[in-house]
Amino acid sequence: QVHLVESGGGLVPAGGSLRLSCAASGGTFSRSGMGWFRQAPGQEREFVAGISWSAGTYYADAVKGRFTIYRDNAKNTVTLEMNSLKPADTAVYCGAVVRAYCVGYGCYGPGRVDYWGQGTQVTVSS
């Protein structure tokens, strides 16, 4: 059974940084894309960043230039480095695994995620 466990969330002042990590278990993920989504209170879940099995990266416009995603296939982890955080970044951040061999932003569209983590809270104070 596949499990995704996130860590690294917390409370940080505006302009600060956080590093989120998502560890996957119960399967082989080196040929799957991985990524991060977030959901703020009262809002729809939205795509944040993704990395394909071939290490191509994808970012939402709202986080380009501030967030960096990378993965470690040996450890089955995907990490999101978040810098210059803003109060608008406050949300629950969830790790995700998408279809094997999928590349491109479309891999992270509705119904394309195979597995979800429970999420970790990120709060950015103003």
Image: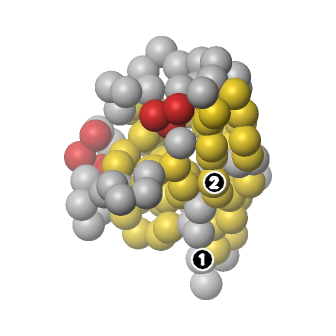
Residue with the mark numbered 1? 2
Amino acid type of disc 2?
Gln
User: Going by the image, does 10 lie left or right of 49?
Assistant: right
Does residue 74 show up?
Answer: no
User: Going by the image, does 113 lie left or right of 3?
Assistant: left
Residue with the mark numbered 2? 121
Please determine whether, in this image, residue 43 is positioned above or below residue 54. below
Q: Check contact, mark 2 vs mark 1: CB within 8 A.
A: no
Name the spot of residue 18 as percent of width and height, x first.
71, 33
From the image, state whether disc 2 or disc 1 is nearer to you: 2
Does residue 44 show up?
Answer: yes
Name the spot of residue 112 as percent of width and height, x first.
29, 62
Q: Quadrant of the N terminus?
A: bottom right
User: Going by the image, does 43 lie left or right of 74?
Assistant: left
Label 2: few (<14), some or many (≥20) within 10 Å? some
Name the spot of residue 106 as percent of width and height, x first.
23, 46
Name the spot of residue 116 as percent of width and height, x first.
50, 67
Mark 2 residue element: strand
Closer to the camera, 124 or 6? 124
The image quadrant that residue 98 belongs to is bottom left
Amino acid type of disc 1?
Val
Label 1: few (<14), some or many (≥20) within 10 Å? few
Q: Residue at x 68, y 64 (%)?
A: 5
| CA distance for labels 2 and 1 | 21 Å
